[in-house]
Amino acid sequence: MSEVSPQVEIVIPVRNEERDLATSVRRLAGYLRSAFPCTARVTIADNGSTDGTWAVAQSLAAALPGEVRAVHLDLPGRGRALHAIWSASDAEVLVYMDVDLSTDLNALLPLVAPLLSGHSDVAIGTRLARGSRVVRGAKREVISRGYNLLLRATLGVGFSDAQCGFKAIRADAARELLPLVTDTSWFFDTELLVLAERAGLRIHEVPVDWIDDADSRVDIVATALGDLRGVCRVGWGLARGHLTVPVLREPGLSGAPGGGAERGLAWQLPRFLAVGVLSTAAYVLLYLLFRGFAGAQAANLAALLLTAVGNTAANRRLTFGVRGRAGAARHQFRGLIAFAAGLVLTSGALAMLHAASPSPGRGTEVLVLVAANLAATLVRFALYRNWVFGSPRGGGTPSETFPPTTALPGTALPGTALPSTALPEALPQTTPVDVINETTGSTR
């Protein structure tokens, strides 16, 4: 490894990891020295540790000069640490890796190679794709799969694993996206991936060998709640047009959103009815399933919410001919509002039924709900046709587009020189040990 600007910078965010830090960093440095063909630097990002982590990080930076450096941030937050170090990095490719090294290091070269070659812009390790080999408990498996399914249903993402602690991004792409990322904790990388996909960047996935750290200090409940808040915030921002993402690559050849809204009623109505029949059948089955352990209103809400997501996605593609991920979050958000009409009608019908007959049979409940759903269908179709999948009105500021033959800002195409006006300011020379002051942004 060299003291000049490295090709790859690997950031390991740590907080109160004094026990495992030295072993993991020495193992990683040894691997980079003996088996990694690119120049690389390891940066330990201590964020708000209260134990001896910072002292261990300083000793590692002193023992491995040119290979390891240590940076201290007063405030905790994995996202905050990655944002600060990636923003100031002089490397071509920026990598994030968990301190426990749960991912087999042999996946590092396949992770960064497509970024160094310019083929892809972002790369992630995935534990949920074919070819992955994962050892972890059932609880974490269910939580991980459920979270990624939620992302696909609500934000329309295409990547398979948002939570694997093994990611990389080209520095030029990071410079464009990091100012848009607001989360400073665990949702940081999910938010970055969503924005990267919206920007049209190519995301490369690497199936990994991954062994769960049984001694992980991550608070699962707090992390899950933070992630849910992040999903709602990003989804709301995209749906309302408050979050504008620049297009950094031309979109693919998939159809443009909104094209299906121009198709005639004769095309749309039969498909809408077919999707509605399947959705109603799924709704009835889910209602009966939930009714076995929940009240009528709760079972109705859960069944309606689950079928709403699937119904909107199916109508988006089959009835209104909208393909691609652009606008998916907005469509899902509006679809949920449309389904609120169904909730009002079905809940009202149930309330009237129970007022007239305190203990109706399940069959009577289902008949009343199906009748109420049919009434709500007409309202949903009108909303779908004229609002949910209609062309957006107004909108935000048009995004700047960088065609494939145009370099990202602050970069140059192969074989060309970077204009003097586009040269970024020189990065400050840093010592192997830095302390970042969050108030001033300076190093000391």
Image (tube, helix red, strand yellow):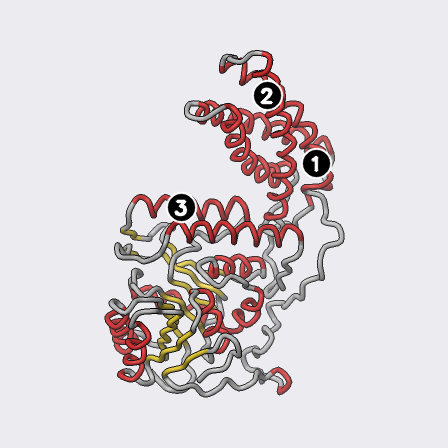
Query: Is 196 situated above or below 6?
Result: above
Secondary element at image label 3 = helix
Q: Circle 1 sits in a helix, a strand or a loop, which is it?
A: helix
Quadrant in the picture for residue 81: bottom left
Q: Identify whether 135 is placed above or below 51.
A: above
* Residue 286, percent from left and from top: 47, 27
Sort mark 1 into few (<14), some (14-19) or many (20+) by Cα contacts within 10 Å: some
N-term-proximal mark, 3 vs 2 = 3
Give the mark toward the camera: 3 or 2. Answer: 2
Residue hosting label 1: 383
Q: Report the amino acid beneath label 3.
A: Arg
Q: CA distance from mark 2 to mark 1?
A: 25 Å
User: Quarter of the image containing the N terminus?
Assistant: bottom left
Asked whether 350 or 176 is in front, the reply is 350
Query: Nearest the camera: 21 or 26?
Result: 21
Label 3: few (<14), some or many (≥20) within 10 Å?
some
Q: Residue at x 72, y 49 (%)?
A: 392
Amino acid type of disc 1? Leu
* On screen, residue 164 above or below 55: above
Residue 410: quadrant of the picture: bottom right
**Which residue sits at x=46%, y=50%?**
225
Element under label 2?
Answer: helix
Distance of label 3 from label 1 (alpha carbons)? 32 Å
Residue 116 in picture, x, y percent from top left: 44, 72
Badge 2: how crowded within 10 Å, few (<14), some, or many (20+)?
some
Q: Earlier in the sequence, mark 3 or mark 1?
A: 3
- 6 with respect to 99 (left or right): right
Provide the residue designation for mark 2: 351
Which quarter of the picture shows residue 201?
bottom right
Q: Which residue is mark 3?
A: 145
